[in-house]
Image (cartoon, rainbow, N blue to C red):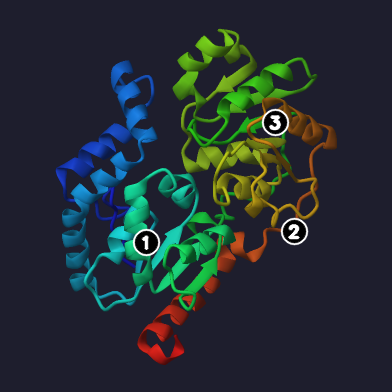
Amino acid sequence: MLCVSSEWVAAEVAEPPTSRLSRQRGTLAELTHDELDSALRRTLRRLARWGVAHTLIALVLLPARRRQLHAAIARFAPDIVQGLRLPYEGLTVLTLNTRIPRVVSTWGSDFQPATKRDALARWWTRVALPRADGIHVDSMEDLTRARSRGLSPDVAWIYAAANFGVDEDLFHARNHHEPGLVVFARRPSHGINYRGFVHAALRLRTRPGARFVATSLQEVERELRREFGDHVSDVIDLLPRLNQHEFAELLGQAHVVVSPSLADGTPSTVVEALASGARVVAGRLPQLEALNQSGDLLVLVDATNADAIADGIERCLDLGIPEISDGLPAPFSRVANAARFTDFYRDVIRRHVSPSDH
């Protein structure tokens, strides 16, 4: 397998992009909120809200990305080209001039709200998606959306968790959960109600035994202090970004994990928390209903309502530490998905070489 990245990454993980603009974007992306000049930060936020800016940058970078991918294909001669993920990597792959079957993945906010608020990305998606030979979705709603944007109903598809499922070597049930430990496990972004979590923690700060930890919210500590007061860091341990091993260790200690998504696919953090044996409070998203078989481990709430988030946390704390579960359903297990994706890719190739199957 050959990996080619559209953004700057460590060379040993994947081939990095060749354009100078991509490298500069990668450097900027690594900066925290406090490291960015306040004026620049405000400008970047305005551009983020104006979603078309990202698509314009992707179109500027498209020729360089296509040249790099064509060279990699000629050198490596793959059986499948997989674009991870819509809108930009997948759309770039679908513009290639190649006879090799092309598969795209979509998860998180690729359709909602990314392309919803970006007319240029919607146009590009409608033009490119009919060229896909296969699609991987982490939400059945996204399969419906893809078909409404031109994906053929005869194209092979697979439903599986984002990033191909949970790495069970890292995220697995342990016996050393800390009673009362509540972990906010998301990044501060427009699609996550992190302020609602802070409000909920402040409301529950007098609850005996409760301890609140938030990953990545150290990035917005100044913002939170202005909004909620300096005491916010006394109530919540505001952590920086964690690497994967640190994050897995924290989830393995958590009693409750909070993921107040306003729009999402099937959040990896939710599935990773369930695999780690924690109770989870998450936004009420249709795709999470499939995981919500008992209603005890996964409590779905109105993520726009801070009091609803607090009520969900209290319910999970009242239920105590859960018993170790029997594991995740196959679509969310990386071990199970290794076989499922092998069968999926074989189906894509079979359909590609046998037009009569369409």
Mark-to-mark CA distance, 1 and 3: 37 Å
Residue nearer the viewer, 143 or 224 = 143
Q: Residue at x 57, y 31 (%)?
A: 193
Looking at the rendered structure, the secondary structure element under dot 2 is loop
Per the image, the residue denoted by label 3 is: 309
Quarter holding residue 93: bottom left
Q: Tell me if 158 is positioned left or right of 234 in this view.
A: left
Residue nearer the viewer, 304 or 266 = 304
Q: Position of residue 83 (x, y in %)?
A: 36, 62
Give the number of the mark in front: 1 or 3: 1
Per the image, the residue denoted by label 1 is: 126
Per the image, the residue denoted by label 2 is: 326
Task: Please rate how many residues cluster around mark 3, counting C-alpha atoms within 10 Å: few if below 14, some from 14 to 19, many from 20.
Answer: many
Tell me, yes or no, if residue 8 can be seen here: no
Residue 310 vs 106, above or below: the answer is: above
Residue nearer the viewer, 354 or 11 = 354
Q: Are marks 1 and 2 in contact (CB under 8 Å)?
A: no
Q: Quadrant of the N terminus?
A: bottom left
Q: Quadrant of the C terminus?
A: bottom left
Q: Label 3 amino acid?
A: Ile
Q: Label 2 amino acid?
A: Asp
Q: Tell me if 330 is positioned left or right of 153 in this view.
A: right
Q: Tell me if 298 is positioned left or right of 223 in this view.
A: right
Looking at the rendered structure, the secondary structure element under dot 1 is helix
Q: Position of residue 356 (x, y in %)?
A: 42, 92
Mark-to-mark CA distance, 2 and 3: 27 Å
